[in-house]
Image (cartoon, helix red, strand yellow):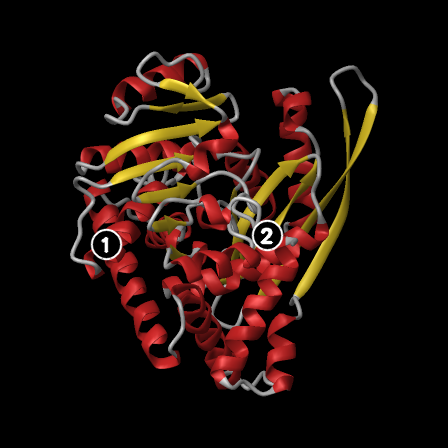
Amino acid sequence: MNALVATNRNFKLAARLLGLDSKLEKSLLIPFREIKVECTIPKDDGSLASFVGFRVQHDNARGPMKGGIRYHPEVDPDEVNALAQLMTWKTAVANIPYGGAKGGIGCDPGKLSISELERLTRVFTQKIHDLIGIHTDVPAPDMGTGPQTMAWILDEYSKFHGYSPAVVTGKPIDLGGSLGRDAATGRGVLFATEALLNEYGKSISGQQFVIQGFGNVGSWAAQLIHEGGGKIVAVSDITGALKNSEGLDIPSLLKHVKDNRGVKGFHGGDPIEPSSILVEDCDILIPAALGGVINKENANDIKAKFIIEAANHPTDPEADEILSKKGVVILPDIYANSGGVTVSYLEWVQNIQGFLWDEEKVNNELKTYMTKGFKGVKEMCKTHNCDLRMGAFTLGVNRVARATVLRGWEA
C-alpha cells in the first residue's frame, strides 16, 4: 500500500474518532499549495540539463510550514503529498508551532558533481524564494541533501531577502545551525523508547534491540541506546547485516562504518541475510530505514514485543492489524521520529533570537517535548480507547482542526 493511501486512511480513521464534520475533514486533506518548477542548469561539460523541482505546502493553520527537501531520482508526487501531510500531523503531535510541507528535485545526486548540485540548488531556490520564508515555509534536509545544501539555499535566499538564517534548518553550525541537531532524531527515538518502556515498568538497560538501517538515525539511536545500557544484538544497512546475541560492540562498529561506509565486514558479529533482520529475536525492533518494510509477508514472524518506528511509514496497515492481534506494541513514526523536527524548531527559535544555546539546553528541551508528546498520545488513547498510532493521529488532527476552526477557516 502506498504512503498516500495509508496516510489518508489513518487520517480518516482519526477524523471519525474525533467526530469531525465532513466539510472540515475534506478541507484538512487538501494541500494549501503545490509548486512545480523546471530547473535548468549548465553541467560541467557545458551541456544543459533540466530537472523538475517541487514543493507541496500542506497546511499552515498552526504556523509556518515545515518539511524536508529530498534529491532522489524517483520523486513520486503521491509520496511527497503523503509526507507533507504527515509533517502537518507530526508537528502538531510534537506541539511545535508549524504546519507541514515536503519537496525536492527529481535527480540522482550521486551522478552530479558538487558544483552541479550547487547550481541546481541555487536555481531551485531562485524559483521558490518568494514562496518560502521564515514565517511562511521553512525547508530542511532530507534524503540526498544535507547541511551544505541548506547553506546554498540560505545564501541564495538571502540575496533576495537579506541575511535570513531562520529560512532553513539543519544548517552547518557556522551558519546558525543548532548544536545537537545531528543526533536529534536518534536522540528523540531514545527518549520516545524510554517513555514507552516506563509505562511497562522497564528501562533501556538490559533490553535486547535490533536496528534496521544504520544511517544517521539508526547509528545515533544505537550509540545512545548502547550508552544507556541496552544490548544491540543485530543491525543492518544497504551493505549487509550482522548479529551477535551477546550484543554488538557499538563504538567499534561505528568506527568500522565510518572507515568502510557500511556495516559489511565488521568482525564483531556474524553476517546474516539483510531480509531476516526484522524477524531476529529481540525485545525491541527499531526500523530506521525505508517505508513499507514491515508488511503482511513478514509480520507474523516478528518476535519483538515493541516496535519503535524511527523510519517514516515502515509498517503497512495490514501488518499493523496482524501485529496488534499478536500483542506487539507499535510506537508510531509521527511521534517516535519527531526529534528531528523538534530540534529544527529549536534551531529556528535560536536564529530568530540571534542567540546560540549550548547542547545541554537543546537536549533538555528535546526531552521535555518528547515526554510531553508521549503523555498527550496516551491521553488520546484513553479518551478514544485506541492504539498508540490512532492516539497520535487523533492528537495531531485534533490540534490542527481546532486551529483551523479558531482562525475561521472551516468551510
Question: In terms of secondary structure, where does tag 2 sit?
Answer: strand
Residue to which mark 1 is pinned: 197
Where residue 316 sits, quadrant-wise, is: bottom right
| Depicted 104 relative to depicted 378: above or below | above
Residue at x 29%, y 44% (from the top left corner): 283
Q: Residue at 50% across / 79% down in the picture?
A: 401
| Residue density around tag 2, few if under 14, some if 14–19, many if 20 or more, within 10 Å | many
Quarter the C terminus occupies: bottom right
The picture quadrant where one finds residue 110 is top right
Q: Marks 2 and 1: in contact by CB < 8 Å?
A: no
**Of residues 11 and 116, the one drawn nearer to the viewer in this rendering:** 11
Q: Relative to residue 405, is residue 202 drawn left or right?
A: left
Give the SS element for disc 1. Answer: helix
Give the vertical position of 378 relative to 219 (above or below): below
| Front position in the image: 13 or 325 | 325
Q: Quadrant of residue 335?
A: bottom left
Residue 395 is situated, as x and y percent measured from the top left of the image, at: 41, 72
Q: CA distance from mark 1 to mark 2?
A: 32 Å
Q: Which residue, given by chain and number where applicable, does mark 2 sit on?
A: 102
Which quarter of the figure is the N terminus placed in? bottom right
* Residue under the point 42% across and 12% down: 265
* Label located before the other in sequence (1 or 2): 2
Asked if residue 289 lies left or right of residue 253, the reply is: right
Amino acid type, mark 1: Leu
Amino acid type, residue under disc 2 in the picture: Lys
Instruction: Give the crowd class for mark 1: few <14, some 14-19, many >=20 residues within 10 Å.
Output: some
Viewer-side label of 1, 2: 1
Q: Position of residue 18 (x, y in %)?
A: 48, 82
Q: Is residue 13 left or right of residue 353?
A: right
Instruction: Name the disc covering residue 129, or none.
Output: none
Q: Nearer the viewer, residue 170 or 329?
A: 329
Q: Is residue 146 visible?
A: yes
